Image (cartoon, rainbow, N blue to C red):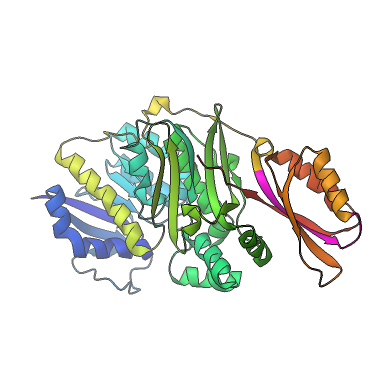
Amino acid sequence: MKQIKIGLLGFGTIGAGVVKLLKENSSLISEKTGAQLSLKTIADLDITTDRGVSTDGIKLTTNADEVLSDPEISVVIELIGGYEPARTFALKAIANGKHVVTANKALLAVHGQEIYAAAKASGVEVLFEAAVGGGIPVLSAIKGNMAANRFSTVLGIVNGTCNYILTRMTQEGADFTEVLKSAQEFGYAEADPTFDIEGVDTAHKLCLLLSLCFGTKVDLKDIYCEGITSVSAEDVDFAKSFGYRIKLLAIGKMDDGQIEARVHPTMIPSDYPLADVHGVFNAIRLTGDFVGPVMFYGRGAGMDATASAVIGDVVDLCRNMGAGISRRCAPLGYVDEKVGTLAIKPMGEIVSKYYIRFQAFDRPGVLARIAGSLGAHGISIASMVQSARSTDIVPIVIMTHEAREEDIRTALGEIDAFDVIRAKSTFIRIEDNLE
Ligand code: HSE
């Protein structure tokens, strides 16, 4: 039986999952591919800490070159994460004629074009299913069986850490910091958890989803990105009372040749399937012109689920190698010369419904002034609530009909300057008209 030798760079949580999966399921994988996968070498700066998995028969080294320059190794799995040295190592593996499998969304969101071009020049593949949605095979589906569709929307919950935090805040009224700590202990969070909670990890993943769905290069800086750090227990409670839940969504929409690309806390109706995605689970909902809406759901982070996607890519490579073919599908699913650069719609021009919470003195005429200013900017109120008074300052919550973001920001700037307003108002966009 043909042996495929693999080298692994990075022996963290997912690396340990890869070792475990290959130990437990290697004969099953051989039955499915006709090849024997053999993990020859693992390189990591720390090769002494016990990862709870057996490394018998695997060479451990602190020198990445023992993977990158080993002529026997044909597949390099990059699980270091971050930009460097992951970029340098990936490029070296490619230059040495090795296929690269990676879970590194940060690397691809920023250096993807350079890496794809290098892979094309070397005639090798770069596969990255694990980079979006952990174990969920969404990228393969977009590039594969859904390829015949024009997509209008791609939207989802793609950060397990944020979803875990928001779920526990919603279900238990739990404290943000304490919940983040347990997400880190479970190994869901990035090495730098600010990437999770500030929405950056979600933006990295949205960047890849947009490229695959719309055949476009996306500059990460053009994606509007707002994390969950300012979501308060009060907003979570108000959302519930209006029949909504707050989720951190990655949103991509095709709009007249421009794309909307945004990451922010979003209120969605509590009867949407997306609202029932709890904890570390992720879900991605795509709308194609022929298939209609399709939703993928599964574990978005964690050792075993992510290892499943990583080895799924290796299985794909084995099958291609078995058939003597390579680069059957380009990394983004579009032939390289057809990957363009679509314009991103400026955030001020997006149209959405909004939840707005004001902190105001409970005095005659306050509501009239707020409503007057919203009305003057063409913002129509759909409903409002003012909580019972326990102090002189009360929250006034207004749900709007569809409005332009720029109008909302201008009106709030005006209202926040009123002498009866006690704190900067907060707003959360609402997504409740999914096709
Ligand atoms: N930190 C990421 C998350 C891991 O929480 O979803 C998976 O990319």
361 in magenta: yes
Quick one: which residue is furthest to the top in this view?
Answer: 337
The picture places residue 57, in percent across and down from the top left corner, at 18, 66
Q: Is residue 153 left or right of residue 407?
A: left
The picture places residue 346, in percent across and down from the top left corner, at 65, 35
Q: Image point 31% across, 58% down: which residue?
A: 307
Q: Is residue 387 left or right of residue 240?
A: right
Q: Image point 90% across, 61% down: which residue?
A: 363
Q: Is residue 187 above or below residue 366?
A: below
**Residue 46 falls in which quadrant of the image?**
bottom left
Q: Is residue 68 visible?
A: no
Q: Is residue 90 above or below residue 176?
A: above
**Residue 195 falls in which quadrant of the image?**
bottom right
The picture places residue 208, in percent across and down from the top left corner, at 45, 42
Q: Is residue 230 left or right of residue 307?
A: right
The residue nearer to you, when weighing 284 against 194, is: 284
The residue nearer to you, when weighing 95 against 421, is: 421
176 in magenta: no
- Total labels: the figure holds 0
The residue nearer to you, when weighing 333 against 400, is: 400
Main secondary structure along the magenta-highlighted residues = strand
User: Where are the magenta residues, as a range?
Assistant: 353-365
Q: Is residue 173 visible?
A: yes
Q: Is residue 285 above or below residue 236?
A: above
The picture places residue 26, in percent across and down from the top left corner, at 17, 59
